[in-house]
């Protein structure tokens, strides 16, 4: 109870409350601008967190990401241009509702069920994290190695592109994490004689580059989105309780899927939205209505993407393994503020963890009034010229990069990773897998080397301990999965139609 009261005091501090409101407005505006993702919004906040207290810094990340995920629905519904990747799954459905004169219902569903999903995801974080923390206290370097390795493999399994391309992206990220001399041997690697590379590549400049700068480059080669026509919205939340009662099972299924996918390292809100929308169509009693402006898919996918946001913090807080690209950025902020992820965080800094839970709940509650206001102001925000927004974003990227390293080399790194992210995206290589490799490469290597030193070079202890053996089996299965899919496609998957034709 003392920890909870201390958490309330921490959250009620003026700087934290100001940070929550300011980042909420910022997240709503950035998320509603077509092409600017929630991850980019979060990455641009990192320089601001340098001057904030630990709780205020984490509050900005949590609130801005939750708001941006919801407000990405606004341009998708009104212009058929998803504001964030998480809203792309049901953009056509929402736009079809707008064409039928039901824009208020579509936007209201996105807002209402996003808030419900966020609260359910927070409850899952509250329930799961302490239980897993107790189990994690018995983990050794052997278990942490397999857990980190499994996180890397999960990112390749959930990638929407080719698993081979996802593995290639992940291996490139691991290669980047090897740069510098902060390794178990203390030997300079891949520095090419540059003293600036001795400290390695910081994750934050890499993240800002691949997500924000590459977004600016994409905007340069794509046409300007159409302008939003003038219109007045009616009641935004009218009829949402009726939808809640009618589609309560899809809503709870979306919440459950979002929680499960959020815990998977590297998956994130956009994957949760795509899977939930597909599940909604598969189990619907009216699948023929999907694509014509049917709200059922919006209910399930809207609940799912925000539920995954909170549950994605479970592996991040417990093991330092990012659940998605947003928590990958958050892990960097946590380390910077002295809140090092790990099971002891729940015992030594319990009040900070309770404060984090309260911020999640508060962010999803204030999402409703601020979201309604944002929907009504959407016509003004969506008229902002892209030519005026992108230079400001590029300037913020440069300032943020300089603030992280206090040198010009960090700015050059942001530019280099921006070009890399742009090229990878254009060729179908998932950037999220690259980021996961950069963030987790050090964890994989250090736990592997430490384990080998403890076992005197023997690899059997990696498989002898019960938990380690289970994690090893899951990891090897995930590693061999793409090979199994490839063999299936080359053999059984192609023979079946031929046999059917012969019959």
Image (cartoon, rainbow, N blue to C red):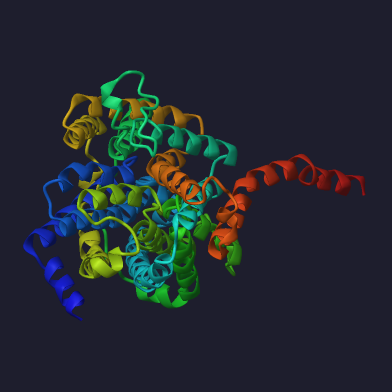
Mark yes or no: residue 169 visible. yes
Vertical comparison of 355 with 79: above or below: below
Compared to residue 502, the image places residue 428 above or below, namely above
> Residue lying farthest bottom?
1
Residue 48 or 371: which is nearer the viewer?
Answer: 48
Image quadrant of residue 440?
top left
Is residue 137 depicted above or below 487 in this figure? below
Q: Quadrant of residue 144?
A: bottom left
Q: Residue at x 53, y 48 (%)?
A: 153
Q: Quadrant of the N terminus?
A: bottom left
Most extreme residue toward the left is 14
* Residue name at image x 54 percent, y 39 percent: 167
* Residue 234, x across and y down, in percent: 27, 63
Residue occupying image coordinates x 18% and y 53%: 57
129 or 214, nearer to the observer: 129
Numbered label tally: 0
Q: Residue furthest right?
A: 503
Where in the figure is residue 247, as x and y percent of width and height?
47, 73
In terms of depth relative to the viewer, which is nearer, 426 or 439? 439
Extreme-front residue of the structure = 456
User: Does residue 20 appear left or right of residue 290 in this picture?
Assistant: left
At which x and y percent is residue 209? 31, 33
Residue 212 lies, with reference to residue 239, above or below; the image says: above
At horizontal 83% and vertical 44% (from top left) the residue drawn is 495
Of residues 18 and 105, the one drawn nearer to the viewer in this rendering: 18
In x, y percent, where is residue 21? 15, 58
The reply to whether residue 226 is visible in this rendering is: no
Q: In the picture provided, is 285 more to the left or to the right than 143?
A: right
């Amino acid at each position: 109870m003392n920890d909870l009261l201390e958490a309330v005091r921490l959250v009620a501090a003026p700087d934290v409350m100001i940070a929550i409101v300011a980042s909420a407005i910022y997240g709503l505006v950035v998320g509603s601008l077509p092409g600017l993702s929630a991850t980019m919004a979060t990455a641009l906040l990192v320089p601001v967190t340098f001057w904030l207290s630990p709780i205020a810094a984490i509050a900005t990340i949590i609130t801005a990401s939750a708001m941006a995920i919801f407000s990405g629905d606004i341009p998708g519904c009104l212009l058929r241009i998803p504001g964030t990747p998480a809203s792309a799954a049901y953009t056509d459905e929402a736009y079809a509702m707008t064409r039928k004169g039901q824009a208020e219902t579509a936007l209201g569903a996105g807002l209402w069920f996003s808030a419900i999903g966020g609260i359910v995801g927070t409850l899952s974080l509250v329930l799961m994290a302490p239980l897993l923390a107790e189990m994690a206290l018995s983990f050794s370097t052997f278990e942490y190695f397999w857990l980190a390795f499994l996180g890397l493999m999960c990112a390749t399994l959930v990638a929407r592109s080719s698993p081979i391309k996802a593995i290639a992206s992940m291996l490139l990220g691991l290669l980047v994490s090897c740069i510098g001399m902060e390794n178990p041997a203390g030997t300079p690697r891949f520095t090419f004689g540059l003293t600036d590379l001795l400290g390695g590549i910081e994750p934050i400049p890499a993240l800002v580059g691949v997500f924000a700068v590459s977004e600016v480059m994409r905007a340069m080669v794509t046409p300007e989105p159409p302008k939003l026509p003038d219109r007045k919205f009616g009641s935004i939340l009218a009829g949402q309780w009726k939808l809640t009662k009618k589609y309560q099972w899809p809503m709870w299924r979306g919440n459950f899927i979002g929680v499960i996918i959020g815990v998977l390292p590297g998956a994130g809100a956009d994957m949760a939205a795509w899977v939930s929308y597909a599940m909604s169509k598969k189990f619907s009693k009216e699948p023929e209505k999907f694509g014509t402006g049917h709200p059922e898919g919006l209910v399930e996918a809207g609940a799912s993407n925000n539920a995954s946001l909170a549950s994605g913090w479970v592996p991040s807080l417990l093991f330092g393994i990012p659940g998605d690209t947003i928590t990958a950025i958050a892990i960097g902020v946590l380390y910077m503020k002295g809140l090092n992820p790990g099971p002891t965080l729940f015992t030594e800094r319990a009040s900070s963890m309770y404060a984090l839970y309260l911020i999640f709940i508060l962010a999803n509650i204030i999402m409703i009034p601020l979201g309604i206001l944002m929907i009504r102001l959407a016509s003004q925000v969506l008229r902002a010229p892209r030519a005026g927004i992108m230079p400001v974003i590029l300037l913020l990227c440069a300032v943020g990069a300089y603030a992280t390293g206090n040198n010009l080399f960090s700015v050059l790194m942001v530019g280099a990773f921006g070009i890399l992210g742009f090229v990878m995206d254009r060729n179908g290589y998932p950037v999220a897998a690259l980021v996961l490799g950069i963030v987790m490469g050090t964890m994989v290597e250090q736990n592997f080397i430490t384990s080998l030193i403890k076992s005197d070079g023997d690899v059997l202890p990696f498989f002898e301990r019960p938990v380690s053996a289970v994690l090893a089996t899951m990891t090897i299965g995930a590693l061999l999965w793409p090979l199994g899919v490839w063999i299936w496609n080359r053999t059984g998957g192609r023979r079946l139609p031929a046999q059917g034709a012969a019959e």
